[in-house]
Image (cartoon, helix red, strand yellow):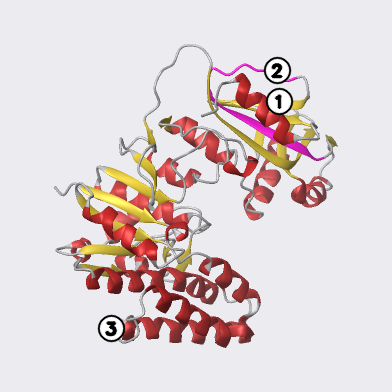
């Protein structure tokens, strides 16, 4: 059996032409048989998302994307894969024009969004072949990657049956991440960050030895860099800890990717493309004695909702709340359910929709003012902060909502308390 190693390169690794040389070096020094999963170039997916709302700007967008990819590989247009590159751009123009006629065409929208990954994979194989690496581009829908109906997951069982493994023979495959097809054969894209999920799914199907997610940061930090606090790279995260951090807003981690690898025994490494040194490995959870804190996350603008119901109405109300969260694609929320009571943290932007949903039920409810949600990630956590408005705990995490006016200062205090500085 091949010792597959799945390498996923996201948009943060495709910002400048010089990134291609570093990606090539990483592949040459990789152990095992590499398989590449690639995202769109930096900023391309955001541009395509905007284009869906403004498809009449198709001409300038297509020309800009052409120039952006040629900046990475100037020989692309006239090279071996030039015809395929131009064909993707032409198909993108056609889909944008079609969207002008039918703005609600979801298949058309998915096709537009998938073009970023298609362009990136073609650009990469042209660049790599010119560097002497034998490789081939593989589109996920052609490969047989099956996406669930709601676009939040990959159907592993169906994908394993459909995937054409002959596409991986002899050459290094560069697989376009983030999309696949549904049961009707239509293109469907995953949620944002879905290329990590594509890599994890391929790792499970191929029984890979490991997955490496190449990023622009040295692994998972104990505190997000956005707070300007020097913190340490976490060398090892158990799967459940990693899931708790991802759900709490860990921007480097995507919960669906981790869940796909759960129970497989396949380690996931998060490494910095341009730096050697510390990195994070995600693997099986390990038993620990006493309380340990590995990471702290903070999300401003969260509201605590406390909903009181009558007896057997709790289930009906909960189903409606869950459906709302699903439809709104809420990424950061925590929920506790008891007899006649539902407690949850949700972003303030969702409050109006949630209140509208609850108007259809005879329930009593209270909500807090917007505050900051602090999440302590680790094991056996016990903590009672004096500024906490509400607290919820789960396996490997404790979350408390605080009205502290300077969340950065409170994070700094917690970092010192739990000794998470470098």
Determine whether label 1 and label 2 are within 8 Å by CB. yes
For mark 3, what is the residue? 79
- Confirm whether residue 259 shows in the render: yes
For mark 2, what is the residue? 384
Up/down of 406 relative to 168, above or below: above
Q: Nearer the viewer, mark 1 or mark 2?
A: 2
Q: Nearer the viewer, mark 3 or mark 1?
A: 3
The verdict on residue 377 being magenta is yes
Earlier along the polypeptide chain: callout 3 or callout 1? 3
Looking at the rendered structure, which numbered label has been put on residue 391?
1
Which residue is depicted at the point 32% across and 81% down?
Answer: 75
Which residue is depicted at the point 62% across and 87% down?
Answer: 101
Number of disc labels: 3
Would residue 4 be found to the left or right of residue 353 on screen? Answer: left
Determine whether label 2 and label 3 are within 8 Å by CB. no
Which quarter of the figure has residue 363?
top right
Would residue 164 be found to the left or right of residue 140 on screen? Answer: left
Label 3, label 1: how far apart the Cα atoms are: 59 Å
Residue 23 at x, y = what percent?
Answer: 32, 58
Characterize the local packing of mark 2: few (<14), some (14-19) or many (20 or more) Cα atoms within 10 angstroms.
few
SS type, badge 2? loop
Q: Nearer the viewer, mark 2 or mark 3?
A: 3
Residue 166 at x, y = what percent?
Answer: 18, 64
Q: Which residues are magenta?
A: 370-385
Residue 145 at x, y = what percent?
Answer: 35, 61
Looking at the rendered structure, which numbered label has been put on residue 210?
none
The verdict on residue 381 being magenta is yes
SS type, badge 3? loop
Would residue 14 be found to the left or right of residue 129 on screen? Answer: right
Residue 323 at x, y = what percent?
Answer: 65, 49
Label 1, label 2: how far apart the Cα atoms are: 8 Å
Label 2, label 3: how far apart the Cα atoms are: 63 Å
């Amino acid at each position: 059996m091949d010792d597959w190693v799945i390498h996923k390169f996201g948009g943060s690794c495709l910002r400048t032409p010089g990134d291609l040389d570093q990606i090539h070096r990483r592949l040459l020094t990789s152990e095992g048989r590499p398989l590449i999963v690639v995202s769109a170039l930096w900023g391309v997916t955001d541009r395509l998302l905007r284009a869906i709302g403004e498809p009449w700007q198709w001409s300038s967008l297509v020309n800009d994307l052409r120039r952006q990819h040629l900046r990475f590989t100037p020989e692309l247009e006239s090279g071996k894969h030039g015809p395929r590159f131009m064909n993707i751009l032409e198909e993108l123009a056609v889909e944008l024009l079609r969207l002008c006629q039918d703005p609600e065409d979801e298949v058309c929208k998915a096709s537009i969004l998938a073009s970023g990954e298609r362009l990136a994979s073609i650009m990469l194989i042209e660049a790599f072949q010119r560097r002497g690496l034998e490789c081939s581009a593989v589109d996920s829908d052609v490969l047989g990657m099956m996406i669930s109906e709601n676009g939040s997951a990959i159907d592993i069982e169906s994908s394993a049956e459909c995937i054409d493994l002959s596409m991986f023979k002899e050459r290094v495959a560069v697989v376009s991440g983030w999309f696949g097809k549904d049961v009707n054969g239509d293109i469907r894209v995953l949620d944002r960050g879905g290329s990590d999920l594509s890599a994890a799914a391929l790792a499970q199907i191929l029984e890979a030895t490991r997955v490496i997610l190449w990023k622009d940061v040295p692994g998972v930090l104990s505190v997000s860099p956005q707070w300007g606090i020097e913190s340490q790279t976490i060398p090892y995260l158990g799967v459940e800890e990693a899931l708790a951090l991802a759900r709490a807003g860990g921007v480097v981690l995507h919960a669906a990717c981790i869940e796909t690898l759960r129970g497989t025994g396949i380690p996931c490494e998060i490494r910095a493309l341009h730096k050697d040194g510390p990195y994070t490995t995600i693997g099986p959870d390990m038993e620990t004695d006493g309380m340990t804190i590995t990471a702290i996350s903070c999300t401003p603008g969260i509201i605590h909702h406390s909903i009181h119901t009558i007896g057997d109405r709790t289930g009906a109300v909960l189903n409606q709340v869950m459906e709302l969260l699903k439809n709104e694609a809420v990424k950061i929320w925590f929920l506790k359910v008891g007899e006649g009571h539902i407690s949850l943290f949700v972003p303030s932007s969702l409050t109006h929709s949630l209140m509208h949903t609850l108007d259809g039920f005879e329930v009593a409810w209270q909500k807090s003012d917007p505050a900051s949600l602090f999440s302590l990630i680790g094991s056996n956590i016990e903590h009672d902060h004096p500024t906490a408005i509400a607290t919820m705990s789960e396996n490997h995490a404790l979350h408390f909502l605080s009205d502290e006016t300077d969340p950065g200062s409170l994070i700094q205090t917690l970092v010192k308390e739990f000794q998470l500085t470098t």
